[in-house]
Image (cartoon, helix red, strand yellow):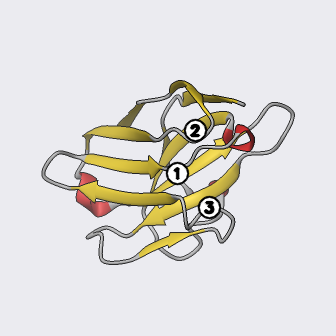
Amino acid sequence: QVQLTESGGGLVQAGDSLRLSCSASGRTFGSYSMGWFRQAPGKEREFVAAISRTGISTYAVDSVKERFTISRDNAKNTVYLQINSLEPKDTAVYYCGASSSWVGVRSPGLYNYWGQGTQVTVSS
């Protein structure tokens, strides 16, 4: 069992930056690929970025990869999402997930564990 807890969200202005954190407890954090997803009101959960177990490989969708950076610290059992130049369209609940497989990290259905989410609201 892995428990994930996101933090770092909030109400910010367009152009600001945020760093979201996802802390893990339970089974070995380093055994899992980690992903960040977001869900805006009335929309489906969408993939944002993922990082492999060791952190050597990262992947982010084209629409955000110039502004979003995913990283992890296995010693601290934490994965991060740095978001720069926030835009109102980034407003969503951001979730982290843990997956036992790197293949298919864009698919939420392949994730084993999820956090409860952290709200990011960007005002114009």
SS at circle 1 = strand
Q: How far apart in space, not on screen, are marks 2 and 1 (Cα)?
A: 7 Å
Estimate how packed mark 3 is, as few (under 14), some (14 to 19) or many (20 or more) residues with alpha carbons within 10 Å.
Answer: some
The answer to whether 108 is drawn above or below residue 26 in the figure is below
Q: Is residue 29 left or right of residue 92?
A: left
User: Is residue 27 something that shows in the picture?
Assistant: yes
Please name the residue that numbered disc 3 is placed on: 64
The answer to whether 58 is drawn above or below residue 93 in the figure is below
Q: Is residue 124 left or right of residue 4?
A: right
Estimate how packed mark 1 is, as few (under 14), some (14 to 19) or many (20 or more) residues with alpha carbons within 10 Å.
Answer: many
Residue placed furthest toward the top: 11
Residue type, label 1: Trp
Estimate how packed mark 2 is, as few (under 14), some (14 to 19) or many (20 or more) residues with alpha carbons within 10 Å.
Answer: many
Residue placed furthest toward the left: 75
Residue type, label 3: Val
Tag nearer the camera, 1 or 3: 3
Q: Are marks 2 and 1 in contact (CB under 8 Å)?
A: yes
- x and y percent of residue 15 in the render? 57, 42
The answer to whether 1 is drawn above or below residue 70 in the figure is above
Q: Residue at x 69, y 65 (%)?
A: 63
SS at circle 3 = loop
Taking depth in this image into account, of 10 and 54 the one nearest to the observer is: 10
**Residue 36's disc number:** 1
Q: Earlier in the sequence, mark 3 or mark 2?
A: 3
Q: Are marks 1 and 3 in contact (CB under 8 Å)?
A: no
Please name the residue that numbered disc 2 is placed on: 94
Residue type, label 2: Tyr
